[in-house]
Image (cartoon, helix red, strand yellow):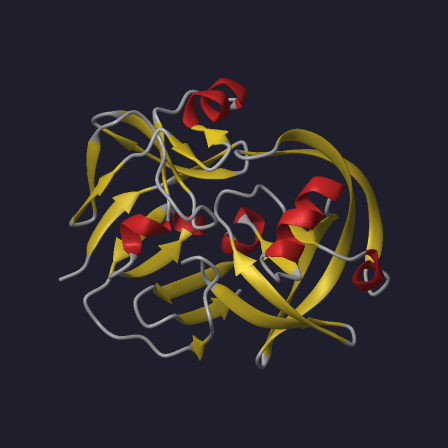
Amino acid sequence: MSESIEVVVREGILCADFDEGCLIIDTGSPVSLGPDIPVRMLGSVVQLNSSFGSYAWTEIQDSLPFDAVGLIGVDAFSDAVLGFDVANNTLARLDVSIDGYETAFVMGSPVVHCQIGEDRLSCVLDTGAGLSYLRSNETAVFGQVLGKQHDFHPMLGTFEIQTVACTLVVGDQSLTETFGIATAELSQLMDTANVDAILGTTFFQQSLIEIDFQNEIVGMTLE
């Protein structure tokens, strides 16, 4: 039997309420962050860490636009198969194997290969990002300019970015997704990880996504 929890998107970031309080569910973070406590989630126990590199949880916590006691990263899911039905506020741990695309994950974060116009892109699935993002302005020429928008990321804080609407093709499926053009700091992080795009919670809200973290497989149905 699968086990599920209720999730909610707060300020563009996927969250769930636990006994400890609100916890961010961030598939773009390699590690779980927070006070030095263990947290039980979907059959696993994960130890929260006070920092990751130069990012201290207390600084991230202070900059959040809502109250959260911690952040659950992909280290909590290393042996799990998860089903994300964000449109219906559900995150489930699945006890069956899934069909999908085999890709090399980036520091444990799930990756899919997509296409926009003539550009083939390596895209990380990031529930800690309120918007989807393109690393390159060159890819944005295939989209329709929408104007500027404010956004927030747990690691980078708040910023204003230009947005475009693009037709995104994954295998034989397609949908229209709004992308922000990455800021210089975010673009540098994406370049370091060799990632062309980030698919954030707006993408998850249009999709049913299954992720096998151990075998690095992503299955999805685009709505």
Q: Position of residue 59 (x, y in %)?
A: 49, 21
Count of picture labels:
0
Is residue 183 at all visible to an observer of this figure?
Answer: no
Task: Please state which of residues 215 and 151 is positioned toward the viewer in this rendering.
Answer: 215
35 is higher (above) or lower (below) than 190? above
61 is higher (above) or lower (below) than 17? above
| Outermost residue toward the bottom in this view | 172
Residue in view at x 75 percent, y 55 percent: 165
Q: Is residue 99 left or right of residue 113?
A: left
| Outermost residue toward the front in this view | 53
Q: Position of residue 10 (x, y in %)?
A: 48, 32
Residue in view at x 26 percent, y 75 percent: 97
Q: Is residue 185 left or right of residue 92?
A: right
- For the N terminus, which image quadrant? bottom left
| Outermost residue toward the left in this view | 1
* Rendering quarter of residue 135: bottom right
Task: Please state which of residues 161 and 33 is positioned toward the viewer in this rendering.
Answer: 33
Q: Position of residue 28 (x, y in %)?
A: 48, 49
Residue in view at x 54 percent, y 37 percent: 12
210 is higher (above) or lower (below) than 85? below
Is residue 110 at all visible to an observer of this figure?
Answer: yes
89 is higher (above) or lower (below) than 153? below
Q: Is residue 196 left or right of residue 54?
A: right
Q: Position of residue 35 (x, y in %)?
A: 30, 25
Task: Please state which of residues 107 and 120 is positioned toward the viewer in this rendering.
Answer: 107
